[in-house]
Image (spheres, rainbow, N blue to C red):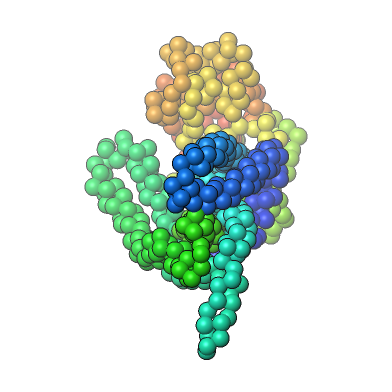
Amino acid sequence: MTDLTTDTDPNPGLFTQLADLGRILRTVRSGRRILWLIGGLVAVIAVTAAAQILLNAWNQPFYDALTRKDFPAFVVQLGVFAVLAGGLLALNVGQLWLDQTLKLTLRRGIFTALLHDWMRPGQALRLSRAGRIGENPDQRLQADVDGLADLSVALGVGLFQAGLLLFSFVGVLWHHSDGLSVSILGRAVEIPGFMVWCALFYAGLASWLSWRVGRPLVAMSAERAAREADFRFEIVRVSEAAEAITLERGERVEARRIKASFARLVEVIHGVIRATVGLTWVTAGSGWFNTVAPILAAAPFYFSTDMTIGELMLVVGAFNQVQGALRWFINNFAGIANWRAILHRVMTFHRALHDLAREDGAAQPDRIRRDGAEGGVEIEGLSIVTPYVSVRLAEDPIRLAPGDRLLLKGSSGSGKTILFRTLAGLWDRGAGRIAMPQAGAVMYLPTRAYVPPGRLIDVLGYPHSAAHFPRPEVEAALQTVGLGHLMASLDVDEHWERLLSESEKHCVSFARVILNRPEWLVMDDTLPQLDPEAQARIVTLLKGPLAHLGLIDIGNGGTPHDVFTRTVEIIAGEGVASAEMRA
């Protein structure tokens, strides 16, 4: 089995992960819209850069007019500024709309692709058993996808804008800083593009220092995201189990667990703080020095030539644009580190889903074989292995005809639940063969009934929509299983998991059986979970309206024996340590 247990090292495979991201976006329906939005952003940014060149050139006549105290020229330049500023305002608003729309579209595309992979039949369960990578999929699909879309657009736009401004203003800066001569060993040496070289040296030094100081932030950001997810999971777990915790008076124990999880998070955050403080010494220091850097670099020209204040301000503006473009890496290093960590988390999640799907489709040794069957059920040579218990049946082979009723009887700890999961296709470690009718012809009722949130009529029709079953049939099924008192609540949207008793939840499951009319029903000790009155009602239902239904119940014998036509004992043995916990 592929090792999918770790995902905290964000360093390797950047280009591979970017290629995976590109393949995801090519497969989603919003891929073409994303390309159009990117094209629109490129066009707006290009026009904005051209307008900024004009605005920078405006500095010279404006400040020269101030120097000459030429009021008419001053007024004219104010009008020019109003036109340029108005155009830039419209461009900025348009860029903001394109930027936000692209982020949302990108998030929708990535989320849709990951959700499709995660919700393939059996995939969510397989992922939950795949180790660390399967923890907190909620964070991968919500916070991480949101962060990836937001940072990808923000950093991509910023990088393109910086590159365009650098290309646009480096020529202006070179032209206005040409011709400076310095004396070296008594000889005058001219340095072409002196201001350009100053900007390159200054930004290059600051970028190198930022990389050296801030490099640990990449791994720290990934670790922090993992610890945040663990911390949130502990809080959600306690919230969902509040009733049981209160009954057991376990508040202090749960508080200690939450505090321990928070302490692990705080430890990682302290490391992030230390790394961020070190990085801030570089970024903030270079930022403050940037206030005087262009004037210091231009001072030799100003004092040795007839350069005017207007020309000086033009050169200073061009220097700031070039140096600002070159400083993009410095200013965004923390964001790049965070983006790199989030990209790694999302793409390893995506790759794990594909690896699991490929593994599931491949023939593997030591796996229980599953076949289709026409009407009946066949179990041959079944031997199930787990790290904790091994399971086999006292009779072999077992062949059931449509309508047969089989009780697979075992004591506590004999592996009843793992046998149920094996029959349902959720566990395949072992040997032998199971042949079952197609999926739609079989329903499975686990020990703990699943009741999703929503309208009660949708809960009863799950996984179909409410429109799949006529309302009178839904009402009749509800009445048959003894939940007629809920008839008036069919259209109420609630968290029914919290409102219904355990017995009522199982009655909801049997109402689904009535509506779906399967050929076979497989239960994991379900009937003993009902209260006596509900159990008697369901047994009557199984003997009457559902008498045609084939039944396999895995339990300890608590179900009335006259429901079954046959009983087979479950034989438990020792577990196998090498058996992987996978589906």
Residue 184, x across and y down, in percent: 53, 85
Residue 20 versus residue 542 in the image, above or below: below
Left or right: 6 as drawn, with respect to 18:
left
Relative image position of residue 402 (x, y in whole percent): 69, 30
Can residue 140 be seen here? no
Residue 121 position within the rendered picture, expressed as x and y whole percent measured from the top left = 63, 41
Question: In this orientation, which residue lies closer to the viewer: 331 or 23?
Answer: 331
The furthest residue to the right: 374
Q: Residue furthest bottom?
A: 185
Residue drawn at 44 percent across, 47 percent down? 69
Q: Is residue 472 above or below residue 31?
A: above
Q: Nearer the viewer, residue 368 or 187?
A: 187
Q: Is residue 577 above or below residue 560?
A: below
Residue nearest the viewer, comparing 355 with 503: 355
Question: Who's the residue at 59% across and 28% down the image?
Answer: 463
**Residue drawn 62% across and 13% down?**
470
Q: Is residue 50 in sight in this rendering?
A: yes
**Which percent across, then down, holds residue 306?**
51, 64
Q: Quadrant of the N terminus?
A: bottom right
Residue drawn at x 63%, y 44% is 47
Count of labels shown? 0
Q: Within the image, what quadrant is residue 404 found in? A: top right
Q: In the picture, residue 197 is in which quadrant? A: bottom right
